[in-house]
């Protein structure tokens, strides 16, 4: 309700109240000692009521921009609103109030002040108040319904993916299955590839580059959304295709099934930097996972293949059968397999390749591989910035990403300062082409500094011998804790220090040895850059009660430190959640502050999903498959 409408309602209430007081004190109507029969007055008021109803209901035609196509109808509507404010079938409460007001006014008795009833001036004041309320209400309604509000009308054109302002297809017709290698609709080349680094794929595998989806997101929607919605157009319902990406991580294997909708080739294209780019739309994502990761089956590759086979059953239920032969399946392994001996890793990949070839899906060349840490960081950066809309921005404003996995951790951001590039090791600066732009990012993956690997490093167990008899202890664990820990297919005997001390300070000292001198501090993170943190950053923030697991949220670095102290100094209270919570929270605090060099007041956006899509490298890897990013 606008301010004018609120004032109008208050004035209406006052007029009705004044009339009601007179009703309680009157039986007939007298004006200057003369009488007017009630029946005549009621008849006149009824005629006025019917005329105003007709005038108030004459809604003019509206133009697309919100204007009127009939000036006479507009004035008629406003005049009716002045006399009977808000009188229309859509406003029954206000209509009832006005009818009561008419009824009261028709029964007034006007005498002199000495007779303790309403005088003529008071009646005129009530009527004027009533008319003023009508003017305010009519003008407010006119302005609200006939002003030009571009964002309002544009938002209404799109029914889905509201946060990313993306159109949605309600019932797309599936494309007919084709034998052999799948073919996709021709799309103008979007990328300007650099010299080849990854072997080129068959021409038939040059389909759709672009996927758009849904950010609460705690982060403010960037300005670029306005330009995207102005340039885009509704989606053609006749073209749907799918992509299946497997993430073989150190602690689990995940499947991401993406459904894309191709825009009508004849629709209005999106323009970026004066180049025409026709973009498909990411309609939805289906996510599932199994534990443990593939690396746990290093001595039994067949069992590892069965976990992938189990997830493929989900893909068969999700992707329509007539699309199976056109839908590519790809698996990328990360730190879990990078930490394994080469022969064991190759045996696992070979088993997965055989499982893929048994499936009804399309298996492209090099569909099963180990992804290096640089690509992992860059593809996660592409995913998050695409989902938050930053890759559309001509201002090149982006967000950084912090990914904490089980075996490795990644940091990636677009430097704003030349000093950041000059002070970083050469291998930490990477370039790639995307959306007709060349990006130069700071990125590095620290193998062995993922959460689970860091636990073993803190305990002194990472790469240690004698696992059958050795017990690894730490002041980061409850004193009476003793348990076997499994990671990467190995079992470790872990314990607290029964006769020693435990707490935050001692734990921080132990964790520092894992980070100090290993993690590089980029110059720029000490500034005001915006970072999204996910994976175990998100999980441990939820476990410790810092954020809500369903919504995510924003945290300062000092919040991790404060909660780490509380958890470590009250381990018995938090042991039921996880006996490693003290160690994990202390490690995260130390990694952010002593490792990367973030200030205490740096704000991090923690999210498991952005617009209902998992924050991981998987979506970026799908881009990499459909359109080679040529990372170098």
Image: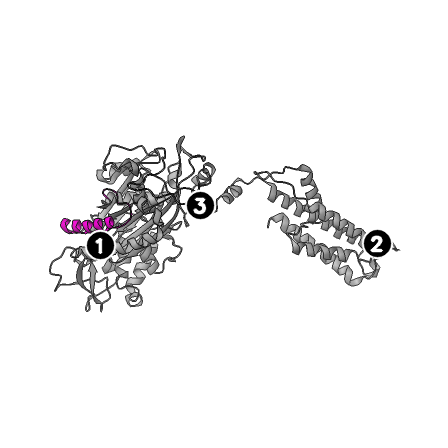
Ranked by sequence position, the earlier of labels 2 and 1 is 2
Q: Residues within 10 Å of mark 2 (few under 14, many from 20)?
A: few
Residue 302 seen in render: yes
Between disc 3 and disc 2, the foreground one is 3
Residue 267 in which image quadrant? top left
> What residue lies at 51% left-to-right and 44% top-to-bottom?
156
Q: Which residue is mark 3?
A: 169
Q: Would you say the residues marked 3 and 2 are in contact, meaning their CB atoms lie under 8 Å apart?
A: no
The location of residue 416, given as percent across then percent down, is 33, 38
What separation in Å lies between label 3 and label 2 (alpha carbons)? 61 Å
Q: Which residue is mark 1?
A: 305
Secondary element type, mark 1: helix
What separation in Å lies between label 2 and label 1 (alpha carbons)? 92 Å
Secondary element type, mark 2: helix
Ranked by sequence position, the earlier of labels 1 and 3 is 3
In reply to whether residue 336 is colored magenta, the answer given is no
Residue 40: mark in rendering: 2
Magenta stretch: give its range: 340-366
């Amino acid at each position: 309700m606008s301010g004018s409408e609120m004032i109008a309602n208050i004035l209406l209430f006052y007029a009705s109240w004044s009339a009601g007081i007179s009703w309680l004190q009157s039986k007939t109507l007298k004006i200057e000692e003369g009488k007017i029969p009630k029946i005549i007055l009621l008849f006149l008021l009824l005629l006025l009521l019917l005329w105003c109803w007709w005038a108030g209901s004459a809604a003019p035609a509206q133009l697309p921009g919100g204007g009127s196509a009939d000036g006479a109808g507009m004035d008629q509507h406003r005049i009716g609103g002045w006399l009977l404010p808000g009188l229309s079938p859509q406003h029954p409460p206000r209509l009832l109030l006005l009818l009561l007001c008419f009824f009261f006014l028709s029964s007034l008795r006007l005498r002199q002040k000495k007779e303790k009833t309403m005088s003529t001036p008071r009646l005129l004041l009530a009527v004027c108040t009533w008319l003023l309320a009508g003017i305010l209400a009519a003008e407010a309604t006119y302005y609200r319904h006939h002003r030009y509000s571009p964002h309002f009308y544009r938002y209404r054109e799109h029914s889905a993916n509201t946060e990313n302002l993306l159109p949605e297809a309600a019932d797309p017709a599936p494309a007919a299955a084709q034998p052999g290698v799948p073919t996709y609709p021709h799309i103008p080349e979007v990328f300007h590839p650099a010299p080849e680094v990854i072997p080129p794929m068959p021409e038939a595998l040059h389909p759709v580059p672009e996927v758009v989806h849904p950010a609460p997101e705690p982060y403010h929607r960037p300005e670029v959304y306005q330009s995207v919605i102005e340039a885009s157009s509704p989606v053609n319902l006749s073209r749907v295709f799918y992509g299946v990406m497997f993430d073989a991580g150190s602690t689990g294997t995940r499947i991401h099934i993406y459904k894309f909708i191709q825009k009508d080739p004849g629709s209005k294209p999106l323009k970026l930097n004066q180049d025409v780019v026709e973009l498909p739309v990411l309609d939805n994502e289906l996510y599932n996972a199994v534990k443990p990761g593939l690396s746990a089956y290093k001595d039994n590759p067949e069992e590892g293949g069965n976990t992938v086979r189990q997830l493929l059953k989900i893909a068969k239920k999700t992707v329509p059968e007539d699309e199976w032969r056109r839908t590519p399946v790809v698996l990328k392994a990360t730190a879990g397999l990078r930490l394994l001996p080469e022969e064991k890793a190759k045996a696992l990949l070979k088993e997965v390749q055989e499982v893929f070839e048994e499936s009804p899906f399309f298996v492209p060349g090099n569909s099963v591989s180990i992804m290096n840490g640089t690509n992992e960081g860059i593809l996660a950066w592409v995913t998050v910035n695409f989902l938050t809309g930053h890759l559309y921005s001509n201002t090149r404003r982006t967000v950084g990403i912090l990914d904490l996995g089980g075996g490795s951790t990644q940091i990636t951001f677009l430097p704003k300062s030349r000093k950041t590039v000059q002070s970083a090791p050469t291998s930490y600066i990477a370039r790639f082409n995307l959306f007709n732009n060349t990006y130069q990012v700071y990125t590095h993956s620290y193998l062995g500094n993922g959460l689970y690997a860091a636990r073993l490093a803190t305990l002194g167990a990472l790469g240690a011998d004698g696992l059958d008899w050795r017990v690894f202890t730490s002041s980061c664990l409850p004193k009476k804790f003793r348990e076997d820990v499994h990671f990467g297919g190995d079992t470790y005997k872990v314990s607290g220090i029964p006769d020693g001390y435990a707490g935050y300070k001692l734990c921080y000292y132990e964790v520092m040895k894992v980070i100090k001198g290993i993690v590089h501090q980029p110059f720029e993170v000490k500034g005001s850059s915006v970072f999204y943190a996910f994976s175990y950053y998100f999980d441990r923030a939820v476990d410790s009660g810092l954020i809500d697991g369903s919504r995510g949220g924003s945290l300062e670095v000092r919040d991790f430190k404060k909660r780490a102290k509380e958890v470590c100094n009250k381990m018995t209270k938090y042991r039921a959640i996880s006996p490693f919570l003290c160690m994990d929270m202390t490690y995260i605090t130390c990694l952010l502050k002593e490792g990367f060099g973030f200030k205490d007041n740096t704000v991090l956006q923690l999210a498991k999903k952005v617009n209902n899509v998992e924050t991981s490298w998987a979506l970026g890897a799908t881009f990499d498959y459909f359109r080679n990013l040529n990372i170098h």
